[in-house]
Amino acid sequence: MKTKQYYYVFLIGILVQFFALNSIAQAHLPECTSGAPLFIADLSANPTDSYTTPEFIRQAGCCGDNDRFVTFYVTLHPDVAMFELVVAPGYADPIGSGNYQIISGGDLTNPGTCGPPIPAGGPICITGAGPHKILYSKPGGNAVKYIFKQIPKPIYPASQPTRLGCSLPLPIYGLNNITV
């Protein structure tokens, strides 16, 4: 009897994944043609949170460009200064061949204004928590998982008194190199 229950739970899990992946393919931003995958993420709880997509193939164009796009409608933490989209470990990463576009205005149903292409390959500055419409395009059509990373602003301690001639560790977060 338990084997039958496990079978049904397994089958339900497979169906949920199937419909979830198909719903990703069906939804798209109004600046894009049907088929450009859309991922909606709320990362506002923690400035170091990230979002990992399921494996998929970029499809369809956006903003009049025929490259293959993936799109994000993402709400960031208020203490975030930058974002970066990286290929998950284990997948091919053709560095330097992708571009970002950040859409000004609009929402999930109303189009905004497409921004200029920004070369990918490193963090991109962004202002405000959003939600933001962020597009990523790259030639080719391999199946990939992406990680959307937030990069927080430098965070300094509220109060850290010391005196001349004394040394004290000063924790500062959000910087690549914290030596002074």
Image: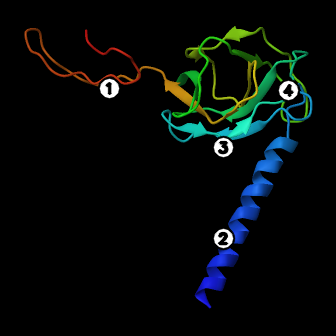
> Residue 97 location in percent, x, y?
67, 12
- Marked residue nearer the N-terminal end (2 or 4): 2
3D distance between C-alphas at marks 1 and 2: 49 Å
Report the quarter where the C terminus lies. top left
| Left or right for 23, reference 125 | right
Between disc 4 and disc 1, the foreground one is 4
First in sequence, mark 4 or 3: give its number. Answer: 3
Can residue 17 be seen here?
A: yes
| Cα separation between marks 4 and 1 | 37 Å
User: Around disc 3, counting alpha carbons within 10 Å, would you say few (fewer than 14), some (14 to 19), or many (20 or more)?
Assistant: some
User: In which quadrant of the rendered image does the N terminus lie?
Assistant: bottom right
Residue labelled with disc 3: 54
Q: Which residue is mark 2?
A: 10
Residue at mark 4: 106
Return the x and y of residue 84 as percentages of the image width and height. 58, 23
Closer to the eye: label 1 or 2: 2
- On the rendered structure, is 29 left or right of 83? right
Q: Secondary structure at mark 1?
A: loop
Position of residue 118 measured from the top left corner of the image (x, y, whole percent): 69, 9
Query: The residue tagged with tag 3: helix, strand or loop?
Result: loop
In the picture, residue 115 is in which quadrant?
Answer: top right
Q: Which residue is under mark 1?
A: 157
